[in-house]
Amino acid sequence: MSTTVSCDGKCLCGVVKIHATNVQPHVGACHCGMCRKWSGGPLLAVECGSQLTIEGKENITAFSSSDWAERGFCKHCGTHIFYHLKGTEDYIIPAGFFDQPTHFKFNHQIFIDKKPDYYTFANETENMTEAEVYAKYMPAE
């Protein structure tokens, strides 16, 4: 069982604040095309689950990026705030959103087979391909 941490963060303009109390301190990189387009590179994020408080929800715009997820951003400053799995209360939040991410450890990458050749991380990580991610997380039809 892994230890969780509490984290606080806010968007660039400060109107959206998050306090998360059950954060897995493991940063993952997603190399899928949508995450790269959304973030301008790989999305480096942490799993926050559902134990979080969002202040300033009225300042968030959510975009339904797939049948199973939506992406939230501040409608004032554009800060990327979350990747949310529809039908759950589970949130994945960019690691850089949090004010003091010193307790995070980069340890996994998903959609590794979609990663462009122009960058490589030096860390040794657990890597999953697109097919492995879908097999693990998508419900069987």
Image: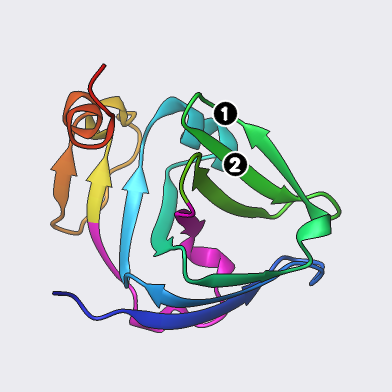
Q: Which residue lies most toward the right here?
A: 76
Q: Quadrant of the C terminus?
A: top left
| Element at label 1 | loop
Task: Report the side of 130 relative to 36 (left or right).
Answer: left
Q: Is residue 5 magenta?
A: no
Q: Label 2, label 1: how many angstroms apart (C-alpha)?
A: 7 Å
Q: Position of residue 113 (x, y in %)?
A: 23, 27
Q: Amino acid at mark 1?
A: Ser
Q: Quadrant of the N terminus?
A: bottom left
Q: Is residue 114 above or below residue 51?
A: above
**Residue shown at 86% from the left, 54% from the top:** 76
Q: Is residue 34 above or below residue 87?
A: above
In front here: 63 or 119? 63
Q: Position of residue 21 (x, y in %)?
A: 45, 80
Q: Position of residue 30 (x, y in %)?
A: 36, 42
Q: Badge 1 is on which residue?
A: 65
Res 92 label: none
Q: Badge 2 is on which residue?
A: 71
Neighbor class of circle 1 (other Cα within 10 Å; few <14, some 14-19, many 20+) is: some
In front here: 137 or 39? 137
First in sequence, mark 2 or 1: give its number: 1
| Element at label 2 | strand
Q: Is residue 31 above or below residue 104?
A: above
**Residue shown at 57% from the left, 28% from the top:** 65
Q: Is residue 96 magenta?
A: yes
Task: Report the side of 132 relative to 34 (left or right).
Answer: left
Q: Amino acid at mark 2?
A: Arg
What range of the chain is rendered magenta? 89-107
Q: Quadrant of residue 32?
A: top left
Do the residues under discs 2 and 1 have CB atoms within 8 angstroms? Answer: yes
**Residue shown at 23% from the left, 34% from the top:** 133
Neighbor class of circle 2 (other Cα within 10 Å; few <14, some 14-19, many 20+) is: many
